[in-house]
Image (cartoon, rainbow, N blue to C red):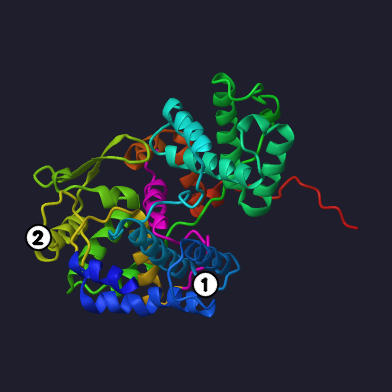
Amino acid sequence: MIDQVLAEAMRLGQKPHGAYRSYWEIYNPITTFFRDRGLEDYSPEVIQEYIGWVTEKYRNGKIKRERYSMLTTAARRVAHFERTGTYLWNVPKRGSRYELDAYYSEVMEGFLAGGDFHPNTVGDVEWVARRYFHWLQREGITEIRQADQEIIQKYLHSCMEEMRPTSIYNVHLYLRKLYRFLYEKGYTENSYETFFAFKICRESRMFPAAEDGMVDTVLNVVDRQTATGKRDYAIILLGYVLGMRSIDIARLKLSEILWSKGEICFVQKKTGKTVTLPLTTDVGEALRDYILNGRPRTDYEQVFIRALPPFRPIKDPCCINDQFRVYCRRAGISREAWDGRGFHSLRRAAGKRMVTSGTSVNTVAQVMGHTSIDSTKKYIALDNEHLAECALDFSGIEVEVQ
C-alpha cells in the first residue's frame, strides 16, 4: 500500500527520486514498526499506535520536531489513502486525532456554529473542545450532563501536568465559553461561572530579536543561483526588512505588490487590518529576481510557490519557519527549542530597528499592523541602549555593611 501511496504522489507531480527518498526516510519506519509486531497487513489501530509511539519519542526528546512532523505526516497520509484511495497533500491540523462519537460531535458543531469566534481563534477553540470531549469519552462519561465540577477540575489538573502555561490559559478560557454555551442550550444545569472565575496567569516571555550579524550569516548561505534560493532570499528579506509575519508572506499575492507606487499592500491574517509597507530597493530587487527568474509558471495568485512539483502555493507558514531553521543550521547557528530565534525573530528585529531609530510608538504600531499599542510597547524592551540611559545610579542610597 505504501508503494501505491508513492505511485499516486508521482502521478500528481512528485519527482521519482524525491518519492523514493521519502520512502527510506519516512515510510520505511512504518513498515518496520508493523513487522516488529509480526504484522504484514495494514491496520488502522496499529497506525494510530505508531503515531502515538512517534509522539512519545518526540516528547521525550529522542527526535526533533522536524523529524516528528515528517513521520506523523507520512503515517496520516497512509491512513488517509487506505480510507479514501487519494493522496493527502495537506495533513489536517492538530485536534484531528481526538475522534468523537456522534453525540459529542453534534455538541461541538453546535458550539462552534453559535460562538461567533474570530477566524484566527476558531482552530484553538475547536482543539480545546475536541480534546476535552475526547477525554470525557475515555473516562466513560457518555453525556456532558454527567461532567460536574469535580470532573472539570480533574481534567484541568491533567492538563497542568501535560501543557505549558499558555496552553492552560487557553483551555481555561475556552472551557468557560463552552460551559456557558452548554448551560444556555440546556445541555447542563450549571454554567460553573463561579468555578471558572479564578484567574490563570498567562505566560508572557520577551523573545530576542534577530541580530544583524546572524541574519547576514544566514543570507550568505542562501544559494541565489537556484529557484529555491531566489524564493527563500526574498522571503527572509520580507521578514527582516519589512517585518512581515510568515503567514502573511505565504498568502502574499502578485496583485498586492504595487510596483508603480513602490508599496506592498495586504490584509494581515492575524488582525484583519490592511497594512501598506514601502517596497524597499533590496526587497524589490529580490522579489523581481524570483518572480522573473525563479518562480514556476502557474496560474496561482500567490507570489511564493513550491520549488518542486506539484507547483502549488506555500500555504502553511510552518514551511517558511522550517526552511529558515535549515538555513540557520547551514550557517552554523545553533538552535534550541523555544529559544525565540526562529523566523518571527526577523519581525522583532524590524520592530526593534524602528524603536531604536527614534520612530514613535504609534508609527511603529501602524507599520507592524498592531491592533493594540501594548503589543508595540514590547519592542521598547528590546532597546537595551536607550533603556540603559533610564537606569538610576546608587546615589543617595545608603550601603549597609554587615
Residue 356: within the magenta?
A: yes
Q: Residues within 10 Å of mark 1 (few under 14, many from 20)?
A: some
Which picture quadrant has residue 152? Answer: top right
Residue 4 appears in the figure: yes
Numbered circle sitting on residue 297: 2
**Front residue (pair 250, 66):** 66
Left or right of 348 in this view: 19: left
Q: Amino acid at mark 1?
A: Ile
Q: Quadrant of residue 275?
A: top left
Is residue 170 found inside the magenta-colored segment of the image? no
The correct choice, above or below, for 334 with respect to 377 in the image is: below
Q: Is residue 243 at all visible to an observer of this figure?
A: no
Contact (Cβ within 8 Å) of mark 2 with mark 1: no
Where is 250 relative to 169, above or below?
below
**Label 2, residues with CA under 10 Å away: few <14, some 14-19, many ≥20:** few
Q: Position of residue 336 (x, y in %)?
A: 52, 67
Q: Quadrant of the C terminus?
A: bottom right
From which residue to which does the magenta span run? 334-360
Provide residue 355's location: percent of width, then percent of height.
41, 46
What secondary structure is marked by label 1? loop
Q: Give the residue drawn at x 36%, y 61%.
A: 82
Task: Decide which of tag 2 and tag 1 comes sooner along the chain.
Answer: 1
**Quadrant in which the N terminus is drawn:** bottom left
Q: Identify which residue, 283 or 140, lies in the foreground.
A: 140
Residue at figure coordinates x 53%, y 60% from the top left: 338
- Identify the residue shown where x is 51% and y is 54%: 207
Q: Is residue 136 left or right of residue 262?
A: right
User: Marks 2 and 1, how far apart in space?
Assistant: 37 Å
| Residue placed under numbered mark 1 in the picture | 63
Residue, x 41% and y 32% (percent of image)? 118
Q: Where is residue 30 drawn, in percent x and y?
A: 44, 73
Q: Position of residue 3 (x, y in %)?
A: 30, 74
